[in-house]
Amino acid sequence: MNKIKTTGLLLLFLCTGFLHAEAKSSADSSLASSMSSAAISDPGFAPGDTLSVSMYDFPELKDAIDVAVDPQGMIHLPYVGSIHIGGLTLSQADRAIESALVSRGIEKQANVTIKVVTSSSMVVYLTGQVAHPASILLYAPAPLAYVLSQGGGFTGVEGKQISILHRSGSLPTEVDFDSQNMTAKAMNTLVHPGDIIDVLPTGVFYMIGEVTRSGIYPITGGLSLGNGIAGLGIARKLTLLQGLAMAGGITEIASRSKALLIRQKPDGTREIIHIDILKLEKGEIADPLLQKGDIFFVPSSYLRNLTNNLFTNLVNSLYVLPAVTATVNNP
């Protein structure tokens, strides 16, 4: 119960901050106001929306007629036929149907009501690095905090930015975001029905080959093992040595002088950088910063592997020989 109350107070605080920000923004210039209005304008009906249309002047049509907007933005009704409503708002679609009935001489003054059954304009989509991506009903603009609260938390590899794509076609809104230190400014960013909220991932690098813990690691310093996330650190930049430390170092049979750092260049080609781990640890060569998508591969050493196997066989023989001798002498 205390947790619920705390959550409620947090949302109240965020919404209060949002209202304060709105009051402040209302004093901005008329140009900014007109740009804001354009950004939140109703984009109208889209293919796949379903409507319930009541036509009161036709006794034989006692019940409302359920129709769907087809891929061309058309609906099909008795007496009206096919009519285009794609991109029209609810009131505009009402008037379009009534005008069609009047223009065709079917009615002098038509009386039509449309109700929205389902519409993508009443839903926001939460995607990306959230625990439970979902479509969320939203009938009016709401703070980003509300939408994110419906996602069940984050995956552990979320990045530092959220992208909000608008159904209206306006430019995406990019929100600086830190799940470990949420700011009121970010959380009060308005989300509108029809928007797509994408929680972008952080950059990752790969540790493979003869390392203690092969895996995928976020640049932020967290650790991804198997199906779980061990948590994110506070580092914002990692060097190769730090990445090796996160992976538990190299194994006994690693080829220390023949490691490879594989990096994708902006043109799509790959650059292969040869790394001598001994020289890296001694500080004889620069410790490179890891970049998003880097792959660090540590091959095995044939000689070390052979030596290790010979040593293991020798140790085993020291235990096996007395046991065999004892068995032969005491059948």
Image (cartoon, rainbow, N blue to C red):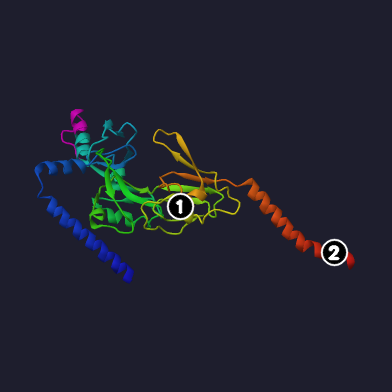
Question: What is the x, y in percent for residue 42?
Answer: 22, 42
Magenta stretch: residue 197 in it? no
Magenta stretch: residue 106 in it? yes
Residue 323 or residue 184, whichever sits in front: 323
Question: What is the x, y in percent for residue 188?
Answer: 23, 54
Q: Residue placed at 29% from the left, 68% from the top?
A: 6
Please give the residue where the numbered disc 1 appears in the rendered image.
241
Residue 269 or residue 229, whichever sits in front: 269
Pointer 1 local density, CA inside 10 Å: few below 14, some 14–19, many at least 20: some
Magenta residues, dominant SS class: loop
- Quadrant containing the N terminus in the rendered view: bottom left
Numbered disc 1: secondary structure: helix
Q: Mark 1 near mark 2, Cβ–Cβ under 8 Å? A: no
In the image as oriented, which residue stretches furthest toward the top?
104
Residue 151 or residue 62, whichever sits in front: 151
Find residue 177 and name its label.
none
- Quadrant containing the C terminus in the rendered view: bottom right
Question: What is the x, y in percent for residue 169?
Answer: 26, 37
Q: Amino acid at mark 2?
A: Thr
- Vertical placement of 31 versus 3: above or below? above
Numbered disc 2: secondary structure: helix
Q: Which of the marked residues, 1 or 2, is nearer the chain's N terminus?
A: 1
Question: Can residue 258 be seen at all in this image of the molecule?
Answer: yes
Question: What is the x, y in percent for residue 245?
Answer: 48, 56
Q: Amino acid at mark 1?
A: Leu
Label 1 to label 2: alpha-carbon separation = 50 Å
Q: How many tags in the picture?
A: 2
Chain part drawn in magenta? 99-111
Find residue 325 and name its label.
2
Question: Can residue 64 be seen at all in this image of the molecule?
Answer: no
Answer with left or right where residue 306 lies relative to residue 230: right
